[in-house]
Every structure is written in C-alpha cells, then in structure tokens.
Image: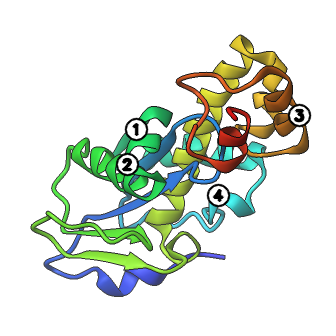
Amino acid sequence: MLLTFEDEYYSAEISNIAGVDEAGRGPLAGPVVACAIVLPRAYLNNEVNDSKQLSDRKRRILFQDIIAHCLSYGIGIVSPETIDEVNIYQAAKLAMKIAIGQLDVPVDCIMTDAMPLDGYDVPVYDIIKGDAKVRAIAAASIVAKVIRDDIMLDFDKRYPEYHFKNNKGYPTKAHLESLRRHGPIKGLHRYTYGPVARCLI
C-alpha cells in the first residue's frame, strides 16, 4: 500500500522533505543507527513500508532501490559507550541529528518517527507511527535497519559465540545464554541494559 501522509505537505514552499528514523533501540549490543533521507516527490514505490513489517530479503531489495533514487541520504551511528553515557533516547536523537547533518540538498521540512528534534530552521514534525505513514520515514527505517544489520553481521564474524548473525544484538534466548557463559564484550554490549548489567554482578 502506498504511504501518502506527506503528500499534503508538498507545496510551492515545500519540495524536499527529509524523513528520519532509527534502528537499534532495543538490542543489548551494537550501535543505534539513524538515517535521514530525501526522496523525490515522484518516488511512489508502494512496497516501501515500516522496516519491521518486511523480510530481510525484501528490505535489502528496497534498500538498493531507495539509495538509487533518493536525492540525498545521511547516516548517524552512535556507539554502545555513548548509549550507556547518555541513555538510548538521547543517543537515538543524536544519531538522527548526525544523519540530518550529512544531507547535501536543501531541506524544507523534517519528519521523524515520533522523535521531537530542535535546533532547525525548518519545521520538524514528529509523527506517531511515522514509519507506517510517511514514505520518507519508512525509507529511512529500511536504510537504517539494513546498515545496522550489516554492522552486526561483521561483529558476528569476530564473535560467533554470541550469534549476532541471528539476533542482531537483541535479547534472544541464545544471546542471553551466551552473555551468561562468556560475559559482555566491552565496547559492544550496552552495560546499562538490565540483562547485561546482571552479568557484571
């Protein structure tokens, strides 16, 4: 189904809408990754939807199409250490601001998935369930998810005992068992998250 929420915002004054979303708030390991993306108004791919509703294969196909057609995109990556320092909410906000800062086309407004952002000279709309309503936010969710998944696949090669290939850092039964058996990895696990913190006691 084609997402059309942002269509009513396009006007003579608003032609470039930046959609912003993040991936990786819930995992026990790995960074939080945000994407900001500006799509052409004419980009009408009806398969673009909230990344959580798509298979890995479909996300990767759409990722290639989105990157090929977008006007600009930026990526923000915030480390587990920073997540522990400032909390995941502030880390996700920081990742979004980094991503927006990488856009190389003028932006007339910003739409986020329920994340209020300040400090911009253009309107910012934090839209509840924006990744299921706004094409640009849905596209950002797909790009952020694929990039974060690839980061975790790289970690899986270095730390296969944690099964990051399968869990992407989320608290699956196998991941929790690996934490109990091997302990957390400094710089990769989020030490302020309960299941990780309990392994340090």
Residue found at x 50% / y 44% = 32
Q: Label 3 to label 4, Cα distance in Å?
A: 28 Å
Q: Label 4 to label 1, Cα distance in Å?
A: 25 Å
> Which residue bears the numbered disc 4?
51
Residue found at x 79% / y 39% = 167
Q: In the current view of this chain or complex, which residue is farthest to the left?
A: 121
Disc 3 element: helix
Instruction: Using residue 111 as the reference point, say whether residue 5 is left or right of it.
Output: right
Three-letter amino acid code of the residue under disc 3: Glu
- Sequence-first disc among 3 and 2: 2
Where does the image place residue 100, in percent across and percent down from the top left?
A: 27, 51
**CB under 8 Å between discs 1 and 2:** yes
Residue 86, numbered label? 2
Taking depth in this image into account, of 123 and 61 the one nearest to the observer is: 123
**Residue 13 seen from this side:** yes
> Which residue bears the numbered disc 3?
177
Instruction: Using residue 174 as the reference point, say whether residue 122 is left or right of it.
Output: left
Q: Label 3 to label 2, Cα distance in Å?
A: 27 Å
Taking depth in this image into account, of 44 and 75 the one nearest to the observer is: 75
> Which residue bears the numbered disc 1?
82
- Sequence-first disc among 1 and 3: 1
**Residue 68 seen from this side:** no
Instruction: Using residue 123 as the reference point, say whether residue 144 is left or right of it.
Output: right
Three-letter amino acid code of the residue under disc 2: Val
Mark 3 crowd level (few <14, some 14–19, many ≥20, 10 Å Cα): some
- Sequence-first disc among 2 and 4: 4
